[in-house]
Image: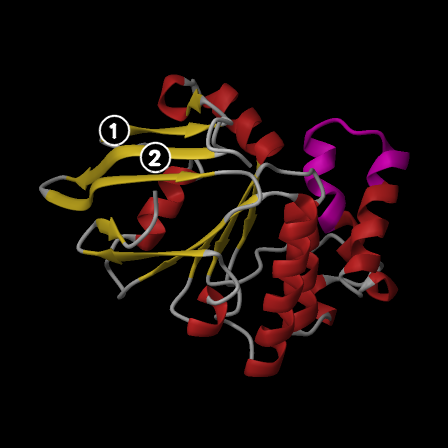
Amino acid sequence: MQATDVPVLECDSVCKEYGSLRVLNGVSLRLFAGESLALTGPSGSGKSTLLNCLGGVDRPSSGAVYLLGEVLSGMDGDALALLRRRRIGTIFQFFHLLPTLSVRENVEFPLVLLGVSEDERRARADALLERVQIKHRAGALPSQLSGGEMQRCAIARALVHKPALLLADEPTGNLDSQNGANILSLLSELTQESGAALVLVTHSEEAAGICQRRGVMRDGTLSENVS
């Protein structure tokens, strides 16, 4: 993308306070379509809080977060929820799959919330399950999957609605080294194919290595080539 295009994600002087504790201190960044940013830094530095603000889960105490030019803090709860459903995909360390739904149903779920037809839901889910190499497990429940299979399902679910922004919070933190390496390779390939902007929170050098840019969080501030 060219610098003249609207960023997928823009964070302008964001601060977040909980009572007298300031967790984020004037964080700014811009991310365009197809760009990837790894957020690294010690525990307690503000990485997860920043990710929550970027995804609209939490609101900044001051400053602003923009998604495709729309300021998140200017939206009411319903509008923000709809924007997140349409434009943001999230991958978690502990998968967060719905235990009573099959693999295919878990992947389809974001499309159910958006009112997509049953035929289109199934076609899109099956195409992604094929891509992440677990279509043969489409009818299985999450409890019947390995950790690597659960994360593959979670990646497919995060991408099925074609989000502009993908947020990943320690996506390999609950996997062994071989599964982690496979998931990182898959995540890198799929985000490049989709053109989504990716923000990846990680303690792993290997995970950070799949991103084009790296930001270091320390004491609520963000530095190193992030804007």
The numbered mark at residue 11 is 2
Quadrant in which residue 185 is drawn = bottom right
Which residue bears the numbered disc 1?
63
Q: Amino acid at mark 2?
A: Cys
Residue at image position (64%, 43%) is 195
What residue sits 45% from the left and 65% below the top? 208
**Res. 161 visible in picture:** yes
Distance in Å between CA atoms under marks 1 and 2? 8 Å
Quarter of the view holding residue 181: bottom right
Could you classify mark 1 by the number of other residues whose Cα lies within 10 Å: few (under 14), some (14-19), or many (20 or more)?
A: some
In this view, the residue in front, 39 or 175, is 39
Give the answer, above or below, for where 88 lies relative to 219.
above
**Magenta highlight: main SS:** helix
**Amino acid carrying mark 1 in the image:** Gly
- For residue 57, side relative to residue 197 (left or right): left
Residue 89's spot in the image, x, y percent? 58, 43
For residue 132, above or below residue 84: below
Q: Secondary structure at mark 1?
A: strand
Question: What is the magenta range?
Answer: 106-121
Name above or below for residue 173 compared with residue 102: below
